[in-house]
């Protein structure tokens, strides 16, 4: 009895299509974490100053610091609304906010039973201490900050 190679080929193509579909869904959702990294000492000094302000809870020099970052570009891992907050990194020589930002992802602990943890980001409320991303090109690319 001969092996039915047509069954083998059909199974191979089915497996290929299934894997491609899973990868496509992961890419669309932003679940693929292929970020390049940037070490703390590699950041511009202004970004290190912004990180220090984030860690101490402010005060922030720009009114829009701490607003929700919605991840419309889908370059960061998918998360519920309010998970990401953005902060301005000053650019020397500019009189406006410029393009540089630090985006902080925070899976918040529940502050009190029955209440949601919304409002101002406070890193001790983050389950994992927060995840930090740096963009120098206004959300076209991100690098994960590694300490």
Image (cartoon, helix red, strand yellow):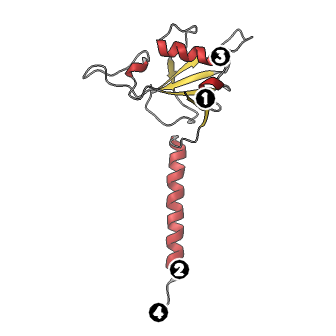
Residue 144 is situated, as x and y percent measured from the top left of the image, at: 57, 32
Pointer 3 and pointer 1: residues touching (CB < 8 Å)?
A: no
Q: Which residue is mark 4?
A: 1
> Could you say which is closer to the camera, residue 4 or residue 103?
103
Sequence order check, earlier mark of 2 and 4: 4
Pointer 2 and pointer 4: residues touching (CB < 8 Å)?
A: no
Q: Is 90 positioned to the left or the right of 103 in the image?
A: right
Q: Which residue is mark 1?
A: 39
Residue at 44% across / 28% down in the picture? 81
Q: Which residue is mark 3?
A: 45
Sequence order check, earlier mark of 1 and 4: 4
Mark 4, secondary structure of its residue: loop
Sequence order check, earlier mark of 1 and 2: 2
| Mark 1 vs mark 2, CA separation in Å | 52 Å
**Going by the picture, which residue comes out furthest to the left?**
113
**Going by the picture, which residue comes out furthest to the bottom?**
1
Residue at 50% across / 66% down in the picture? 14
Residue 30 is situated, as x and y percent measured from the top left of the image, at: 52, 40
> Could you say which is closer to the camera, residue 111 or residue 123?
123
- Picture quadrant of residue 102: top right
| Mark 2 vs mark 3, CA separation in Å | 62 Å
Q: Which residue is mark 2?
A: 6
Residue 57 is situated, as x and y percent measured from the top left of the image, at: 47, 12
Q: Disc 2 vs disc 4: which is toward the camera?
A: 4
Mark 3, secondary structure of its residue: helix
């Amino acid at each position: 009895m001969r092996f039915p190679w047509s069954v083998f080929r059909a199974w191979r193509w089915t497996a290929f299509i299934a894997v491609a579909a899973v990868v496509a869904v992961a890419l669309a959702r932003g679940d693929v974490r292929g970020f390049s990294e940037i070490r703390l000492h590699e950041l511009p000094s202004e970004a290190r100053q912004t990180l220090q302000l984030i860690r101490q809870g402010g005060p922030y020099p720009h009114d829009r610091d701490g607003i929700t970052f919605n991840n419309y570009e889908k370059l960061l891992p998918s998360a519920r609304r309010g998970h990401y907050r953005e902060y301005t990194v000053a650019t020397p020589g500019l009189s406006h906010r410029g393009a540089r930002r630090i985006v902080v992802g925070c899976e918040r602990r529940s502050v009190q039973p029955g209440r949601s943890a919304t409002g101002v980001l406070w890193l001790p409320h983050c389950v994992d201490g927060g995840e930090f991303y740096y963009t120098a090109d206004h959300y076209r690319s991100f690098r994960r900050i590694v300490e």
